[in-house]
Amino acid sequence: MRRKTRAEPVRAAVVACQPPCYRGCVSSSPPPLRNPTAGRPDGAAGKTHRDRKKGRRRSALGVDEPQRSCIVCRATGPAATMLRFARSADGAVGLDVAGRLPGRGAWVCAAARCLEKAVEPKHGGFARAFDAPCLTTAALTASVRATLRADVLSRLGLLRRAGALVLGREEVGRRVEGLALLALADDLSAGSRREVAELVGGRACERLPTMAEVGAAVGGRPVGVVGAPAGGATTALARAIARWSGVEGSASVGDDAPATVADEDDDAPPSP
Ligand SMILES: [Zn+2]
């Protein structure tokens, strides 16, 4: 028979709340609310970590995606495919690449035309969106392009570290059936593009930064051909590519531009 032992009284730190807690608690910090939405008329303010995680997953799957409208052309699209800008206290406007900065945001299509127009001070789209004076410089466009380019490269690096990236035309050609995303470096020669098109059965290929940049991102020698299987990270990479190539607005994949870089290294597997 188990003997009932008398519970030791909990010795709480005798620190009275300042001001005293409404529960008569002696702890210096009030206890957390059991239901974070309790007592809050606006349900959104009480979102839990799990709610937000669930929301991000649904968003990655393309379910219930929030829609935003461009401050330039007024076109509406999923928030994940657009560019969010935030305004700092001093009025400077900058790209919120992850779309998570607090406060009001201004949304612009991931298109060179809309971005260039939005940045023009006389357009005034940012000032209207933020309802406050905004500072934009010509350097903002270049900075947005550089940030989106870096975003693509960092996502490539993440996929590589996760072991999910297939590199080089031979490997991509062999495993093409299991790949959801195919992408070619911007400076891949026309001849190499034709070879890859044959290997992948004419499937559409996304555009990537240069072979040297892609190679540096995945930790090796220049890489011209990349593939990735289906998954959340691949979807995020495809969206990052779409945003970057949209604002870059120059030659697209498949152009028969003359080769500027030798073909020999474009599919060399990176050194470990
Ligand atoms: Zn637009």
Image (cartoon, rainbow, N blue to C red):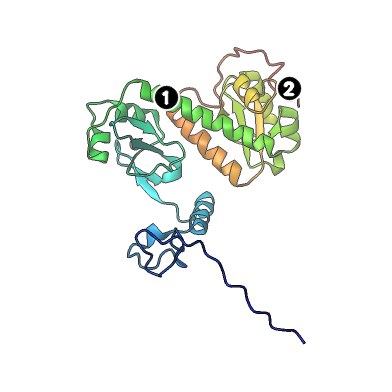
Q: Residue at x 71, y 28 (%)?
A: 169
Q: Residue 192 vs residue 108: left or right? A: right
Where's ligand 1: which quadrant?
top left
Q: Residue 120 vs residue 80: left or right? A: left
- Quadrant of the image occupied by residue 105: top left
Helix, strand or loop at mark 2: loop
Quarter of the figure with the N terminus: bottom right
Q: Residue at x 73, y 22 (%)?
A: 268
Location of residue 263 with respect to 175 vertically, above or below: above
Question: Label 2, on which residue?
Answer: 268
Location of residue 229 with respect to 226 vertically, above or below: below
Distance from label 2 to label 1 (Cα)? 31 Å
Q: Residue at x 28, y 27 (%)?
A: 135
Q: Is mark 1 within 8 Å of ligand 1?
A: no
Coordinates of residue 175 in the picture (x, y in percent): 74, 38
How crowded pointer 1 is (Cα within 10 Å; few <14, some 14-19, many 20+) is rated as: few
- Quadrant of the image occupied by residue 103: top left
**Total numbered labels placed on residues in the image:** 2
Say what amino acid the circle numbered 2 marks. Ala
- Judge whether residue 201 can be spotted in this image: no
Q: Residue at x 41, y 51 (%)?
A: 66
Q: Residue 50 vs residue 247: left or right? A: right
Front position in the image: 88 or 161: 88
